[in-house]
Image (cartoon, grey):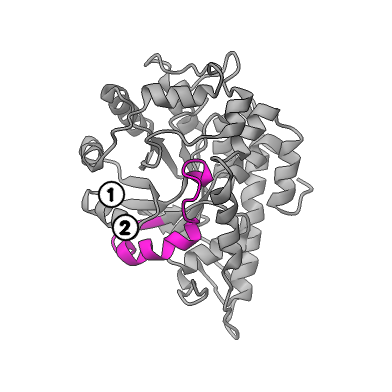
C-alpha cells in the first residue's frame, strides 16, 4: 500500500466502502464524545524519553497468557467484516497471521469460527456475547474450544446497544446472502433492516441478555478450560471483582465509543485498573490507538498489549489480507521507531515512568 499512516488508510477505506458499511464501522454513540476523547487522551500523554541506551537491536515481541506474540498489538473483535471485503474474517485472519499478530474473532462474524480457525496462523481468541438462550452461548463456547481458540473474551458493556444515530438513519442490516455465520444453527443469523431504525439494535434487544451479572462470569469460567478475559472495564473496582470471579485478564475498553457516550477515555482509565490488578492478570486496552507511539504509551501505563479495531477494518477494505498485514506493519514500524527514540530496546524494557498520566 502506498500509504504512510492509518489516517490515510482510513480515507482510502472510506472511498471503497458503502455508506452503510462505513457509517457502521466509523460511527459512535450519540455525539461521539467518547470516540474523539479516546484518541485525544493518547495524544495528550508526553513521552519522557531515556537517552544513552543501546537500542541497536529492538524486540517488539511479547508473551500473553503463555502465548508468544510477535507484536503487543492484537486485532480487536469487530462484527460483520464481509461488509468490508468479500473474504471478511478469513482475510483478516490471514493478514494477522502474516504479521504474527493475535486476532479476536467476534461472535457476530460473517464467517463461521471453524473456517477462520482453519486459516489462522497467529494466536486466535473468541469474543463472546451472552444470549438470552443460555444453550446458544454454551454451544458457542464448546465450538470455540473444539476449533482451537486459545482464550475467550467476554464483552460486558453491551447490556443494551448504545444509540448509534447513523445506523438508525441508514436502517443498518446485513445484505442478502450475508449472515452472522456463527449463529446459523441457532436460527439467529439474520439481521434484516429494522422497522424505522437499525436492524442490529433490534437484534441485540431481542436476543442478547440485559441481565448479565458477575454470576454469569462465574458460570462461563466453570463452563470452559480456556482463560476468560473480561472486555469493557473502565473502573478499578470492577477489574478487581472480575479477577475475584476468575477472569484471567481484563480489557480496558469503552467499546470504541459505541456504547455510553461520555465514558472515560481508555488512556485515562488504564492506570487505575493496572494498579488494582496488573500483577495478577493480563491487562489490555483498546480505543483510539492510531500510532505506534500510542502503543508505547499504553505499555508504559502498564498494559500488556493493545487491541485495534477500526484500523484493521480500514486495512481489510483497502487490501484484504494484504491490507490487514500492511496496517500492522505500519503500527509495528512506528512502535519500533518510538521505542528506539525512547531508549527501549524491548517491550519488556518499557519503563513505567516513560509517560506521566
Is residue 84 shown to the viewer in this render? no
Q: Which residues are magenta?
A: 255-283
Give the residue drawn at x 72%, y 37%: 14
Which residue is more in the foreground, 112 or 174?
Answer: 174
Is residue 227 shown to the viewer in this render? yes
- Image quadrant for the N terminus? top right
Mark 2 = which residue?
Answer: 281
Residues at marks 2 and 1 touching, judged by CB atoms closer than 8 Å: yes
Whole-percent x, y for residue 312 in the image: 60, 43
On screen, residue 191 versus residue 24, left or right, reads: left
Whole-percent x, y for residue 81 in the image: 57, 31
Give the residue drawn at x 40%, y 54%: 234
Tell me the tag on residue 247: 1
Which residue is more in the foreground, 267 or 225?
Answer: 267
Whole-percent x, y for residue 252 in the image: 42, 53
The relative height of residue 75 versus residue 68 in the rendered view (above or below) is: above
| Nearer-N-terminus badge (2/1) | 1
Q: Dot 2: what SS? A: loop
Q: Dot 1: what SS? A: loop
**For residue 212, which quarter of the picture?**
top left
The relative height of residue 256 versus residue 272 in the rendered view (above or below) is: above
Amino acid at each position: 500500500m502506498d500509504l504512510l499512516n492509518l489516517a490515510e488508510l482510513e480515507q482510502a477505506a472510506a472511498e471503497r466502502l458503502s455508506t452503510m458499511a462505513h457509517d457502521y464501522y466509523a460511527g459512535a454513540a450519540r455525539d461521539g464524545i467518547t470516540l474523539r476523547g479516546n484518541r485525544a487522551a493518547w495524544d495528550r500523554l508526553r513521552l519522557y524519553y531515556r537517552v544513552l541506551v543501546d537500542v541497536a537491536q529492538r524486540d517488539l515481541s511479547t508473551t500473553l497468557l503463555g502465548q508468544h506474540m510477535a507484536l503487543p498489538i492484537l486485532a480487536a473483535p469487530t462484527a460483520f467484516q464481509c461488509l468490508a471485503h468479500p473474504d471478511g474474517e478469513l482475510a483478516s485472519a490471514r493478514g494477522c497471521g502474516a504479521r504474527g499478530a493475535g486476532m479476536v474473532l467476534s461472535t457476530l462474524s460473517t464467517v463461521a469460527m471453524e473456517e477462520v480457525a482453519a486459516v489462522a496462523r497467529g494466536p486466535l481468541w473468541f469474543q463472546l456475547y451472552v444470549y438470552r438462550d443460555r444453550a446458544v452461548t454454551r454451544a458457542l463456547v464448546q465450538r470455540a474450544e473444539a476449533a482451537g481458540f486459545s482464550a475467550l473474551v467476554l464483552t460486558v458493556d453491551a447490556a443494551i446497544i448504545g444509540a448509534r444515530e447513523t445506523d438508525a438513519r441508514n436502517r443498518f442490516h446485513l445484505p442478502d446472502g450475508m449472515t452472522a455465520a456463527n449463529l446459523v444453527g441457532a436460527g439467529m443469523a439474520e439481521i434484516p433492516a429494522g422497522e424505522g431504525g437499525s436492524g442490529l439494535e433490534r437484534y441485540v434487544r431481542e436476543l442478547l441478555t440485559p441481565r448479565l451479572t458477575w454470576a454469569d462470569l462465574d458460570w462461563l469460567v466453570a463452563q470452559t478450560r480456556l482463560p476468560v478475559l473480561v472486555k469493557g472495564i473502565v473502573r478499578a473496582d470492577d477489574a478487581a471483582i472480575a479477577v475475584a470471579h476468575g477472569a484471567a485478564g481484563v480489557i480496558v475498553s469503552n467499546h470504541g465509543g459505541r456504547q455510553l457516550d461520555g465514558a472515560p477515555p481508555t488512556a485515562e482509565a488504564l492506570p487505575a485498573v493496572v494498579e488494582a490488578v496488573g500483577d495478577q492478570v493480563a491487562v489490555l486496552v483498546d480505543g483510539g490507538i492510531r500510532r505506534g507511539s500510542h502503543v508505547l504509551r499504553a505499555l508504559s501505563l502498564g498494559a500488556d498489549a493493545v487491541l485495534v479495531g477500526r484500523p484493521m477494518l480500514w486495512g481489510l477494505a483497502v487490501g484484504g489480507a494484504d491490507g490487514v498485514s500492511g496496517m500492522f506493519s505500519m503500527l509495528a514500524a512506528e512502535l519500533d521507531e518510538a521505542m528506539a527514540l525512547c531508549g527501549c530496546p524491548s517491550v519488556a524494557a518499557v519503563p513505567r515512568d516513560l509517560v506521566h498520566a
